[in-house]
């Protein structure tokens, strides 16, 4: 009798232990990536290869130490946004020892070098998928049993950001954190959609211009990429009728002046010691950012735009298109497009909450700016170094 009782207790203990195990402990795990590929991940990854190191900004929203997972990455973050790279390096010094497979933004990587790093998970971006080198690398990795997934926060940011976050939560065993961030994003996006839906009058037109003062005038966003942000906030993209490329293309200044958008928005980046174009991003000072906006407008003939004369000229961090905090840029756009409708929406408060609840490395700097100081908000202030 005693033996039966002990056996029954042992069985119950085993069952209770099984019930107590979290769902994310179950491996292997099959997922579907952004390209619709079914991928099996055998175990929780411990050696991750990032084909694009900008992905690190997104991983840091659901993992407290994403650098600890890396065996290699692209070199695009250090080259394209060195201040963000330095912020991560200060928090995670081990980043300095992570091999970089590329030396600039948009490059393909060496298959041989990638294989030599022996990753147990490879994370690539959707824009890399058509490259011959990427296809070769994927074939080699799959043949060796190494899972490869594609995410996207750049080509279709509003369509693919949240599915990409959920996918990363699945493969990195961070489901709960990923779902919390997804809920946060959905609540803020839903507020924007619901308010925009109440508008019945003519929508303001916007020119979203990449890197004024750094690139020749005027590279404009199309319907894809950052152009999706304009659609969400209910703005008319003045470039769409004259662009053949949905991703964006070059517009002559004369054509821009002929269309006279109601609102002008340029994008920029910040690199200490480089005063070219709009100075926006991690580490950027708000006063310097506004001065850069005034300087760019004065030096590029954009001053002839009616929007500029009326003070409706603004700047956004270029990499809102490509990171999972794109919501912050969308909220800034919503305020500029519909100031009365979104006067109570504070992108600065949204960024502060992201930093407090999610970001392993806080986003500190000036990420948006306006000619009107009351409308910029700026973003979180950099901490004293």
Image: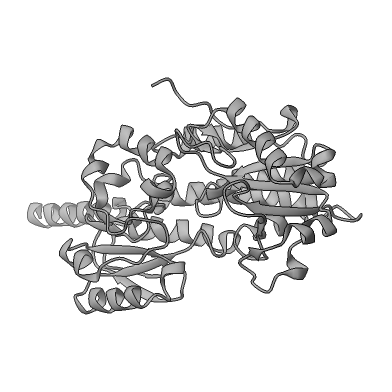
Asked whether residue 346 appears in the rendered view, the answer is no
Q: Nearer the viewer, residue 198 or 377?
A: 377
Tell me the colour scheme of the image. Answer: one colour
The answer to whether residue 97 is seen in the rendering is yes
Point 38% across, 35% down: residue:
87
* Residue in view at x 24 percent, y 67 percent: 42
Residue 287 x/y as whole percent: 61, 25
Q: Quadrant of the C terminus?
A: top left
Which sits in the foreground, 327 or 204? 204
Residue for point 81% across, 47% down:
305
Tell me where residue 63 sits by quadrant.
top left
x, y percent for residue 240: 74, 66
Q: For this rendering, which residue is in front, 57 or 178?
A: 57
Above or below residue 119? Residue 385 is above
- Would residue 312 be found to the left or right of residue 18 on screen? right
The reply, left or right, for residue 236 in relation to residue 120 is right
Residue 112 in the image, given as x and y percentages of width and height? 19, 69
Residue 277 lies in quadrant = top right
Number of marks present in the image shown: 0
Spot the residue most to the top: 384
382 or 207: which is nearer to us? 207
| Image quadrant where one finds the N terminus | bottom left
The location of residue 359, given as percent across then percent down, is: 44, 39
Residue shown at 18%/61% (left/top)? 117
Q: Is residue 188 left or right of residue 132?
A: right
């Amino acid at each position: 009798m005693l033996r039966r009782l002990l056996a029954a207790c042992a069985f119950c203990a085993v069952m209770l232990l099984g019930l107590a195990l979290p769902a994310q402990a179950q491996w292997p795990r099959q997922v579907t990536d952004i390209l619709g590929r079914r991928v099996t991940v055998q175990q929780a990854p411990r050696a991750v290869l990032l084909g694009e190191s900008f992905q690190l900004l997104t991983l840091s929203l659901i993992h407290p130490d994403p650098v600890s997972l890396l065996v290699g990455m692209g070199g695009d973050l250090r080259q394209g946004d060195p201040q963000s790279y330095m912020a991560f390096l200060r928090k995670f010094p081990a980043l300095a020892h992570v091999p970089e497979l590329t030396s600039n933004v948009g490059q393909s990587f060496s298959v041989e070098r990638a294989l030599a790093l022996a990753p147990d998970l490879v994370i690539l971006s959707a824009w890399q998928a058509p490259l011959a080198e990427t296809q070769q690398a994927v074939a080699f990795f799959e043949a060796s049993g190494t899972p490869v997934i594609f995410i996207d926060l750049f080509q279709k940011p509003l369509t693919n950001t949240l599915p990409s976050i959920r996918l990363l939560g699945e493969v990195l065993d961070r489901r709960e954190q990923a779902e919390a961030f997804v809920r946060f994003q959905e609540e803020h996006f839903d507020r924007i959609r619901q308010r925009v839906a109440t508008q019945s009058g003519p929508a303001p037109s916007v020119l979203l211009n990449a890197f004024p003062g750094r690139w020749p005038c005027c590279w404009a966003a199309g319907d894809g990429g950052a152009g999706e942000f304009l659609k969400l906030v209910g703005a008319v993209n003045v470039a769409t009728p004259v662009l053949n490329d949905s991703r964006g293309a070059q517009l002559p200044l004369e054509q821009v002046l002929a269309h006279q958008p109601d609102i002008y928005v340029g994008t920029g980046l910040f690199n200490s010691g480089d005063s070219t174009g709009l100075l926006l991003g991690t580490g950027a000072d708000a006063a310097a950012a506004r001065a850069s906006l005034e300087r760019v407008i004065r030096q590029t003939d954009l001053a002839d735009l009616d929007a500029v004369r009326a003070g409706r000229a603004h700047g956004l961090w270029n990499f809102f298109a490509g990171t999972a905090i794109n919501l912050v840029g969308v909220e800034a756009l919503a305020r500029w497009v519909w100031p009365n409708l979104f006067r109570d929406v504070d992108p600065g408060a949204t960024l502060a909450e992201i930093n407090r609840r999610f970001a392993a490395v806080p986003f500190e700097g000036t990420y948006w700016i306006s000619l009107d100081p009351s409308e910029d908000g700026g973003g979180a202030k950099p901490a004293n170094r």
